[in-house]
Image: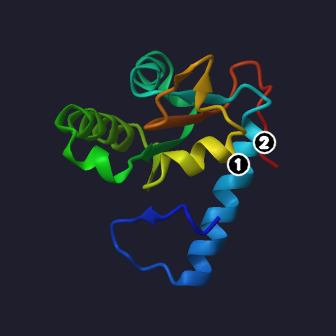
């Protein structure tokens, strides 16, 4: 849990509050995954946002140290953030894609190739299969 760090614009979270945020995010991801309420990947997320932004409740943008130098990824993040802001979609930035893969139970692996965990959307299903109690 301590390997996943979050950034927020105001940096106002205390360490105990951050632990609560981490636990809440892990719980949301673990319960959304079996319900099919997660979209993984920058391009897949962009398509989903374009088709049905009203059903997206959270956008997680994740980077590792190497990703800071990836100009194309940073441009995608800027566009996704702008779209999410215009559509009142909550955004959370994290800095450990490997930890996200672990939380998702190895969902970062697809066959022998690694999936793109830089953007994860948590959605509410159109047919209400996804519930957040």
Could you tell whether 53 is left or right of 64 in the image? right
Question: Which is nearer the eye, 64 or 130?
Answer: 64
Q: Is mark 2 on a helix, strand or loop?
A: helix
- Provide residue 87's location: percent of width, then percent of height: 40, 37
Quarter of the N terminus within the rendering: bottom right
C-alpha span from label 2 to label 1? 5 Å
Snapshot quadrant of residue 9: bottom left
Residue drawn at 75 percent across, 44 percent down: 30
Q: In this view, does 101 lie above or below 35?
A: below
Say the numbered circle drawn on residue 50. none
Q: In this view, does 86 lie above or below 65?
A: above
Residue drawn at 68 percent across, 29 percent down: 37
Could you tell whether 38 is left or right of 53 in the image? right
- Provide residue 25's location: percent of width, then percent of height: 64, 55
Tally of numbered discs: 2
Q: Is residue 102 above or below residue 73?
A: below
User: Which residue does the numbered mark 2 point to in the structure image?
Assistant: 31
Could you tell whether 99 is left or right of 28 in the image? left
Q: Callout 2 environment at 10 Å: few (<14), some (14 to 19), or many (20+)? A: some
Say the numbered circle drawn on residue 28. 1
Q: What element carries label 1?
A: helix
Q: Callout 1 environment at 10 Å: few (<14), some (14 to 19), or many (20+)? A: some
- Provide residue 131's location: percent of width, then percent of height: 79, 38
Cβ atoms at labels 2 and 1 below 8 Å apart: yes
Residue drawn at 46 percent across, 20 percent down: 44
Colour mode of the rendering: rainbow
């Amino acid at each position: 849990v301590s390997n996943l760090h979050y950034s927020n614009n105001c940096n106002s979270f205390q360490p105990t509050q951050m632990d609560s945020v981490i636990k809440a995010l892990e719980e949301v991801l673990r319960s959304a995954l079996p319900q099919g309420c997660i979209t993984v990947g920058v391009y897949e997320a962009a398509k989903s946002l374009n088709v049905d932004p009203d059903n997206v409740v959270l956008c997680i943008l994740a980077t590792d140290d190497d990703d800071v130098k990836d100009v194309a990824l940073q441009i995608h993040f800027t566009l996704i953030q702008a779209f999410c802001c215009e559509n009142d979609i909550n955004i959370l930035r994290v800095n450990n894609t490997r930890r996200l893969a672990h939380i998702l139970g190895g969902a970062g692996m697809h066959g022998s190739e690694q999936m793109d965990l830089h953007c994860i959307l948590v959605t509410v299903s159109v047919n209400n299969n996804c519930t957040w109690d």
